[in-house]
Image (cartoon, rainbow, N blue to C red):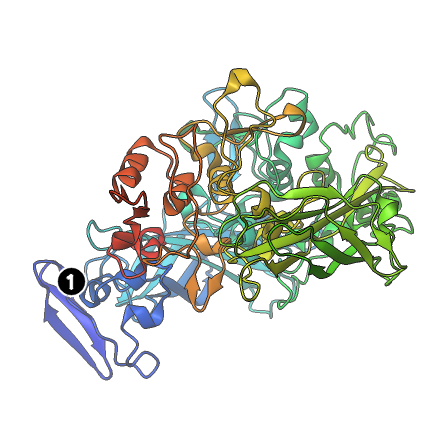
Amino acid sequence: MKSLRGSLVMAMTAGALLILPMSNTRVTRIVSRTAETQGSTDPKTLYGPQQAEYWLSADEFGYVRPGLNITVNSVSIGTDGKAVVDLNYTDDLGQPLDRNGAITAGAISTSFILAWWDPNGRQYTAYTTRKQTSPITGVTAVQAGTDSGGHFTDIDLGHATYKFGTAVPAGYDATATTTLGIYATRDLITPGISTKDYYANVEQDFVPNGAPVSQVWDMIDTNSCNKCHDPLSAHGGARRDVKLCVLCHQPQTVDPDTGNTVDFKVMIHKIHMGSSLPSVQAGTPYQIIGFNQSVNDFSTVVFPQDIRNCATCHGAANASTPPPTQSANWYTYPNRAACQSCHDDVNFVTGANHPGGVQVDDSACATCHQPQGTLEWDASVMGAHTVPFKSTQLLGINATIVAVSHTAPGQNPTIQFQLKQNDGTPISPASFGNNIAVLMGGPTTDYAIDPFREGASGAAFDGTTATYTFTNSIPATAIGTWAFSLEARRTVTLDPAPSNTPTVNESAFNPVFYAAVTDAQAMPRRQVVDVANCNVCHDSLQLHGTLRRNTEMCVMCHNPNASDVSQRPAAQLPVESIDFKRMVHRIHTGEDLTHDYTIYGFNHSVNTFNDVRFPGDRRDCQKCHTTVNGVGTEQVSETPPPGLLATQTPRDWYTPMQHYAAACLGCHDSQAAAAHAVTMTATFPGTGNVAEACATCHGPDGAFSVDQVHAR
């Protein structure tokens, strides 16, 4: 078929190919009539509002034809030693794409890798390589890379073959599992139409002699990475599958500038260990120098959970999916490279810091480091990586608030609660000493005060239920509904124990109970986020010495009027807001903040968050936010919930900030953004009422709705 450039665009229909004149605005609509997609060309039926495609008009959608999908029809290695790949390119509707971008929008660049799998060494070796010479050290390294010198043959629209320029070496093992890796980018960023490029990764296993594939790599599920990375994307964004990564990131490849290997099992452990690496703590940064001599320094990375929680990456991505078939490799095949990546103060050559002494190879590793021993923190791999708060030595603390009475204005509430171990055994409040407290605060429309917090170790206990009456009364002016919560913690001495932490704090998940003060019935506080979403990355959110674990409780203290006033030195005034919606947005924005965000905490500790390296995409609001009645709680409403308070922000561009401004300026913290927010805030003369005009543009139906401006 002859290529048509510039003036024509083609549209596929059932049984026919239509050639349509292309409009001057390049937005001719291409309609699919296939059985699979009939009636589904409206982007709002194919995509969600958090996706950029959802917001395309019909004409824009027809021009862009979103998506990039690659299907490998076959791959073989010819007698000349060069692989030949037969492949198809399609959009999200299954329609063919012109890889040159002449007939359909967006040229597609494609790169190919070829590597063979060694099931005994559990690693790849790439046939496609390159030489990289360091301008710093003068060292030249042979690195795994992509093919060069190959060529495409276009067969039909969306259908081509690619012949490698690289030949496999003479005498190569034609019986070995060989993996073809492909990564491709469809360049579709078009001003005024499309805001994104599209990427595709494919890994195709085959045996060159035609035998069935029996040995494959299957150690890590990319979905496990994407729980935090949302999505994993490296080298400009085109490389997104872990299996694709390991084709190059194996022992074959070294960074000649630093001498660091980029072997996946070493590099990934080191990156996630980051600031906790013994070498980094001793003053040596962990760096890899990459493309165009870019310096990639991972020395400030802080893993958001206990690094010993190996199953976070190695296990199943979620409860509904099985783990990778080789997910047990981390504890069944101990080796020096993987272990030394985190424990990089161990020297296997000299035996320094290794109780087993000198190790010249990996043959003896499993002798001491068996998969599972009989004790926690023994020499077994799983035992040594026991997370302290998950120790089987802990008996558990489960807290329940049974009832709250006497909650009228001016009364002293009485709270009844139960504490039980995992086996159901009741626990007396007295056993917690100073580490048990009950809290109350309100109103739930927006918490306005520091909650009353009282020690409850002296609560009356009948063997099952504890009863405590607050010494503080609910203020006579209180209205609405108030919340009650509980915190309980005990310190447990572990035996056996990890060498550096013989004790662990065991705490209860904080229950929250709502009681009416002046309301006819209790009105719970709106649920904006879900701690389960936090725990996707944090595993178990445990703050303030593990006492606080429930975001539903966090907001009682971290309210619009809250600040670090009790801990901030006078010389460092004014105070900093710790309002939850602003604080959490600021913390997760971290290194992308335009000015300082430092909170003074317990014992005047200085907590600066400007170096936080958030691993995800902050535009994915529903990573943290919940959905209520089909509407995400990140939305701006024209009729906000009643009783919302302004946030006191004396260290920001202006104070106070109304509710939506405080949330949005948590991330968008520039002076320009603040100027926009304050301009859109009005005080009505004669009433003192203050309102935000945010929903006019940013409401669900606005031209710049929250979903639309954050769509990816």
Q: Is residue 712 depicted above or below 88 in this figure?
A: above
Towards the viewer: 460 or 329: 460
| The C terminus, quarter of image | bottom left
**Residue position for label 1:** 27
The secondary element bearing badge 1 is classed as: loop
Image x and y of residue 580, in percent: 52, 43
Q: Amino acid at mark 1?
A: Val
Image x and y of residue 465, in percent: 83, 60
The residue lying at 78 percent from left, 50 percent from top is 390
Q: Residue furthest top?
A: 571
The residue lying at 56 percent from left, 47 percent from top is 555
Image x and y of residue 61, in percent: 24, 65
The residue lying at 84 percent from left, 49 percent from top is 429
| The N terminus, quarter of image | bottom left
Instruction: State whether residue 107 appears in this view.
Output: no
- Residue 342, located in which quarter of the rendered image? top right
Determine crowd level at label 1: few under 14, some 14-19, many 20+ residues with C-alpha closer than 10 A.
some
Image x and y of residue 163, in percent: 38, 57
Question: Residue 73 vs residue 270: left or right?
Answer: left
Q: Is residue 639 depicted above or below 379 in this figure?
A: below
Question: Residue 551 vs residue 677: left or right?
Answer: right
